[in-house]
């Protein structure tokens, strides 16, 4: 293809259609990111997956009724989704206005953030101070955050120690970390069922650490004020972890390298709950 032919192809290209498709794609992506800060994203993903399956089956087997519903019900589905997810959309837009696009796209904690949390947990364990720190991941925790006390400060060892200092106003319940920031403290979490294996012997703080990870993909770090032991919980499974370097390495493995839920029993881990 010579230069003249390339110019002819470009002249025939419908730029308005390309921009149209790009804007729709950006809007869909933005909607998913806004909803990703809430647990409604799980429901939305399931609904989208179901619609895709119906579209594929309808086209593959020429299912008249299914195709008619999909063709004529799209507008109703969009309006229905806007009504169903109205609280989540409002929260997402509010979050975007307060934090900006860059913070909205940031999910994973930085290595400095992980090191600061590990150091704070180790210090609190040595002092006998209880703590519960939750790392938000893909499943949003905005509904949990809104029930707590807004902090919105960069994560540091001193900040976390101050939050959980005994008898401080925010030391009860959980602190939520999003990206590199502590977004809220004194957040109430759902509790794990006492009948689950190994959970019954723990107190409310550990049951909350397990409960939030059963319902979301969050990772929680819990420090026992009675024993000084540190545990990491993911996927509803609680692993006791050695302090200091081992804890930092385990958090890096799970949060930065996205390791599995403690499977393989790396050195320094002891599973204290079961399925």
Image (cartoon, rainbow, N blue to C red):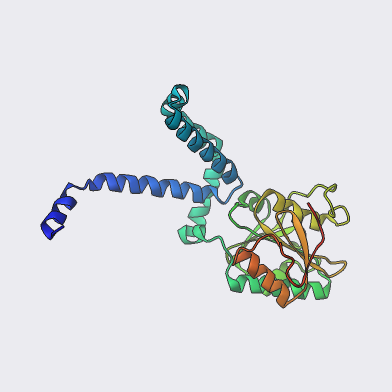
Residue sitting farthest toward the bottom: 245
Q: Is residue 8 above or below residue 76?
A: below
Of 181 and 193, which appears nearest the observer?
A: 193
Q: Is residue 265 visible?
A: yes
Residue sitting farthest toward the left: 4
Q: Is residue 93 visible?
A: no
In the displayed structure image, the side of residue 31 where residue 258 appears, left or right? right
Q: Is residue 84 above or below residue 170?
A: above
Residue 268: percent from left, percent from top = 77, 72
- Quarter assignment of residue 179: bottom right
Residue sitting farthest toward the top: 65
Residue 140: percent from left, percent from top = 60, 52
Residue 91: percent from left, percent from top = 55, 47
In the displayed structure image, the side of residue 198 where residue 113 appears, left or right? left
Number of dots carrying numbers: 0
Residue 18: percent from left, percent from top = 29, 47
In the displayed structure image, the side of residue 163 where residue 197 appears, left or right? right
Residue visible at 61% across and 63% down in the picture: 258
Point out the image quarter for the N terminus: bottom left
Of 87 and 115, which appears nearest the observer?
A: 115
Residue visible at 57% across and 51% down in the picture: 37
Residue visible at 25% across and 45% down in the picture: 16
């Amino acid at each position: 293809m010579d230069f003249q032919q390339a110019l002819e192809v470009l002249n025939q290209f419908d730029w308005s259609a390309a921009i149209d498709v790009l804007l729709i794609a950006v809007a869909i992506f933005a909607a998913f990111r806004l909803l990703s800060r809430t647990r409604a994203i799980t429901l939305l993903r399931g609904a989208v997956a179901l619609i895709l399956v119906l579209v594929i089956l309808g086209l593959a087997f020429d299912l008249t009724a299914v195709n008619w519903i999909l063709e004529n019900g799209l507008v109703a589905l969009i309006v229905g989704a806007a009504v169903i997810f109205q609280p989540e959309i409002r929260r997402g837009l509010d979050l975007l206005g307060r934090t900006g696009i860059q913070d909205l796209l940031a999910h994973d904690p930085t290595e400095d953030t992980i090191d600061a949390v590990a150091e704070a947990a180790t210090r609190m364990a040595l002092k006998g101070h209880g703590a519960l720190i939750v790392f938000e991941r893909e499943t949003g925790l905005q509904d949990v955050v809104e029930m707590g006390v807004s902090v919105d400060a960069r994560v540091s060892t001193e900040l976390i120690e101050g939050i959980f200092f005994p008898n401080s106003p925010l030391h009860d319940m959980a602190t939520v970390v999003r990206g590199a920031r502590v977004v809220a403290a004194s957040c109430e979490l759902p509790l794990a069922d006492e009948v689950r294996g190994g959970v019954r012997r723990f107190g409310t703080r550990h049951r909350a650490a397990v409960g939030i990870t059963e319902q979301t993909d969050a990772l929680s770090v819990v420090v026992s004020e009675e024993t000084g032991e540190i545990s990491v919980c993911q996927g509803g499974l609680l692993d006791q972890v050695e302090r200091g370097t081992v804890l930092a390495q385990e958090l890096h493995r799970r949060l930065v390298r996205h390791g599995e839920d403690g499977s393989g029993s790396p050195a320094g881990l002891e599973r204290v709950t079961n399925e």
